[in-house]
Amino acid sequence: MLGTLRVMYGKALTPLARIFMRAGLGPSVVTVIGTVGVSLTALWFIARGHLVLGSLLTALFLLGDGLDGTLARMSGRESKFGAFLDSTLDRFADGVVFIAIGWWCVVLGDGVGAAMAAAALVMGFLVSYARARAEVEGWDASAGLFERADRLVVALAGTLAVGLGAPQWVIALTLGVVVLGSVVTVAQRIAAAYRGSDADIVAARQ
């Protein structure tokens, strides 16, 4: 859903990427720093109930998620390993964010919120896996309603809203939206993989 903003987002990161490049920081180092930042802020603040500060700081580190890619392109240091590392650590950071939200729900005795956080975590991994597995087979399954940015924006928006005074059930509601959007995305990617498989069969018969 937020894919249309990526071009502007990449341009906005260019000045910061230029500063990092002059400082001699490589893309992989930036990837690791961003993952550590997201993980620490989510676990230290969100999981302990400091929802406003935690959501804002976590979102700030997540805004830099594309910084490593921008830096890699500007410095001519794009690599398959860099893309692999970025994707792998993205999954780790996502998991930490949803674990932190789920933990806070557990602390408050919000079983529904905790269950939704767990479901959002599982479905988020499934969304990523469906695309990765399809790509192994040579099929394009990159499309989908809820990509990584969408899931995190909605989840953190709900957490921030509760921190600002909204009822606790808002977290469960927004996480439910994440789960539903992820289910739709997985279905879309399975359908894309099926079409790719059919195309392979047709090509083999010709």
Image (tube, helix red, strand yellow):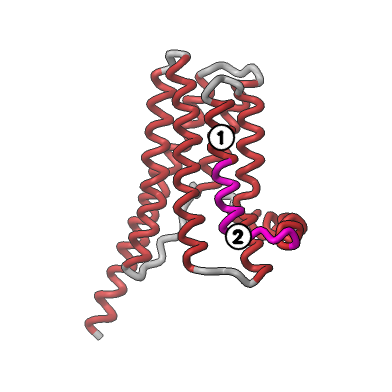
Give me the residue at 49% from left, 21% from top: 104
**The magenta segment:** 22-36
Q: Which residue is mark 1?
A: 40
Residue 32 part of the magenta-drawn span: yes
Examine the image and state in which quarter residue 24 appears: bottom right
**Res. 11 in view:** no
In this rendering, the answer to whether 153 lies above or below 53 is: below
Dominant secondary structure of the magenta stretch?
A: helix
- Mark 1 is on which residue type? Leu
Examine the image and state in which quarter residue 106 appears: top left
Q: Where does residue 178 sit, x and y in percent of width and height?
A: 47, 37
Residue most toward the top?
Answer: 109
In this rendering, the answer to whether 164 lies above or below 29 is: above
Residue 84 — which label?
none
- Mark 2 is on which residue type? Pro
The reply to whether the C-beta atoms of the residues labelled 1 and 2 are less than 8 Å apart is: no
Q: Which residue is mark 2?
A: 27
